Image: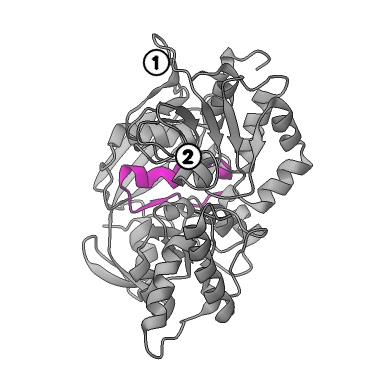
Amino acid sequence: MGYTMAQKILATHCGRDSVIPGEIVHVKADYVVSNEVNAAMCFNDFNRLENARFYDKERIVVVPDHYAPNKDIGSAEQCKLVRLFCRQHEFPHYYEVGQMGIEHVIMHEKGFVAPGEVIAGVDSHACTYGALGAFSAGIASTDMLYAITLGEIWLKVPETIKITFKGKLPKGVGGKDLILYTIGKLGMDGARYKVIEFYGDAIGQLSMDSRFSLCNMTIEAGAKCALMPPDELALAYAKARCKRAFVPVYADADASYIEEYEWDISQLTPQVAIPPEPDRVYPVSEVIKDKEIPIEQSFIGSCTNGRLEDLRVAADIMRGNRVHHNVRFIVIPGSQEIYMNALKEGIIETLVESGAVFSTPTCGPCVGGHMGLLASGERCVSTANRNFPGRMGHVESEIYLTGPAVAAASAILGRLGLPEEVKGV
């Protein structure tokens, strides 16, 4: 019997020939990444240890992104603690405001992720890096302390679900729609503590930006990690950004999976997760068929959809159109690099002329942080990843999760809607 991608990567990183789902293993981490929230707790614990040492500061990445730029005094103090700790210990990979971005965007952007590696992310959306064929999983702040001092994490080897998307990817459908569709099929705990391996012709048709979006939200189905076998596009991306050798890993042909799904997506249309949970997924066309859903805000950004492709999609729809007078349209790029590229391409000018507002790279309203909070009774169409009550502000506000095309079109229409409803698209 062969082995899955996860089994092979984990075995290599714990010095074993093989590992079996269910067993506890100690695994070497190639990189550890944290935001300011969890890093603050970890660093406080580090300071209480006697004779504590870092296993390798070159392998530690810290990115203040959840509440930076600081949204209040509490977040300012938290970021200050992390900033001073990183300065004191001369961390080479600390990204301050001005150099920062959202951690799950800049990790692979800056070459910290390579195929076949293990990335320990102190945030649940670390599963994003599986788009490059890396085993990347969220850990807690106490696990981070273990990782930065000993260079490893411990975990239970997960079982793996195999999902194959058949058919040609329809126009206007991207990675966000595929993952929303997947979450709708599996439910929020359908992949609990499992790895999802993605295959199929549709995956090969996705850009890297779209693949990152797809892997990013597997945690919303409960998954420990997402993995895609690195193809030519993924390998070219990694080689262009990573300054070290790496060995891509692929599942054996006779690998054993706990579940297998095969879905034909050739007729898939834009999807939406309606409140209050991310697995309440339907085609947008079905949701708006008999009911108009007015909105007060539209948001494009977050570690799910704050990439350059997402901003391009929005600009193409907004060009020649105006944001509805009842809507606040907030756009937040995922990194400084994306921000600059959007500036050079004229994307920012197009969006601002349409009535959008921009923010520096940050998680922003996705996590109830910098700008964009909702008041009681308000609705937002959001490209972020969660729509639980209170996630983006008041507990009586509502969040509709979509891809960037639907978010842009909705900003113009003043209600949840589709791009084909917008003049000029």
Q: Which residue is mark 1?
A: 286
In the image shown, does 356 or 134 lie closer to the viewer?
Answer: 356
**CA distance for labels 1 and 2:** 21 Å
Q: Is residue 222 magenta?
A: yes
Residue at the (62%, 53%) spot, across then down: 237
Q: Which is nearer the eye, 238 or 39?
A: 39
Magenta-span inclusion, residue 237: no
- Check disc 2: other Cα within 10 Å, few if <14, some if 14-19, many if 20+: many
User: Which one is nearer the viewer's eye here, 358 or 317?
Assistant: 358
Q: Quadrant of residue 329?
A: top right
* Extreme-top residue of the structure: 290
Q: Secondary structure at mark 2?
A: loop
Which mark is nearer the camera, 1 or 2? 2
Q: Which residues are magenta?
A: 208-231
Where does residue 355 sit, x and y in percent of width and height? 68, 27
- The quadrant in which residue 200 appears is top left
State left or right for residue 82 relative to residue 196: right
Instruction: Give the image quarter of residue 142.
Output: bottom left
Residue 398: image location, x then y, percent? 40, 30
Task: Spot the residue most to the front.
Answer: 73
Q: Is residue 414 above or below residue 28?
A: above
Q: Is residue 193 above or below residue 289?
A: below
Q: Residue 384 got which mark? A: 2
> Image height check: is 302 above or below 99?
above
Look at the image and tell me in which quarter the N terminus lies. bottom left
Q: Earlier in the sequence, mark 1 or mark 2?
A: 1
Location of residue 214 in the rendering, given as x and y in whole percent from the top left corner? 46, 41
Residue drawn at (41%, 57%) of the image: 123
Whether residue 147 is visible, yes or no, is no
Q: Amino acid at mark 2?
A: Ala
Disc 1 packing (10 Å; few <14; some 14–19; many ≥20)? few
Would residue 300 be found to the left or right of residue 21 on screen?
Answer: right
